[in-house]
Image (tube, grey):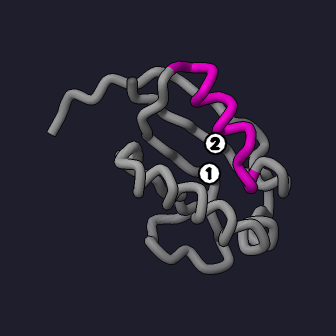
Amino acid sequence: MLFVIISEDVKDSGPLRAQARPEHLARLNVLRDEGRLILAGPCPAIESENPGPAGFTGSIVIAKFSGLNEAQNWANADPYVKAGVYESVTVKPFKYVLP
């Protein structure tokens, strides 16, 4: 089943993100290589794909997991969680409808 992982950043998360980014992306690439990643990306703090010093307010991941426990465990093990980037992480089942 698909699950959405919605993460909200702490204030001024930029330096923390930069430090943990390689490990964070490596885990996402594993999901992609396994054919389980639907989409992933950060939410810019301003209307720009490259927000510069404004940074990001959080991230969204939609991926396939065997159940809620697996999705939650995967989210909890994210390097951004360990680095203190995220203030909160919510994991929910997701039903893909369109396109």
> Tag on residue 8?
none
Tell me which amino acid carries mark 2: Ser
Q: Position of residue 42 (x, y in %)?
A: 53, 58
Q: Position of residue 72 (x, y in %)?
A: 65, 28
Quarter of the figure with residue 23: bottom right
Q: CA distance from mark 1 to mark 2?
A: 5 Å
Residue indicated by mark 1: 58
Decide if residue 24 is on the left or right side of residue 11: left
Q: Quadrant of the N terminus?
A: top left
Q: Quadrant of the C terminus?
A: top left
Tell me which amino acid carries mark 1: Gly
Q: Nearer the viewer, residue 88 or 3?
A: 3
Q: Nearer the viewer, residue 30 or 37?
A: 30
Residue indicated by mark 2: 7
For mark 2, does the 10 Å Cα neighbourhood hold few (<14), some (14 to 19), or many (20 or more) residues?
Answer: many
Closer to the chain start, of discs 1 and 2, is 2
Q: Nearer the viewer, residue 44 or 25?
A: 25
Q: Position of residue 14 (x, y in %)?
A: 74, 70
Q: Are marks 1 and 2 in contact (CB under 8 Å)?
A: yes
Position above or below: 28 against 26: above
Decide if residue 35 is on the left or right side of residue 89: left
Magenta-drawn stretch, dominant element (helix, strand or loop): helix
For mark 1, does the 10 Å Cα neighbourhood hold few (<14), some (14 to 19), or many (20 or more) residues?
Answer: many
In the structure shown, which secondary structural element does the residue marked by tag 2 occupy?
strand
Identify the residue at horizontal 41%, vertical 49% (top origin). 34
Identify the residue at horizontal 50%, vertical 77% (top origin). 50
Q: Give the residues drawn in magenta, as a range.
A: 67-80
Q: Furthest-left residue in view? A: 99
In the structure shown, which secondary structural element does the residue marked by tag 1 occupy?
strand
Identify the residue at horizontal 57%, vertical 50% (top origin). 59
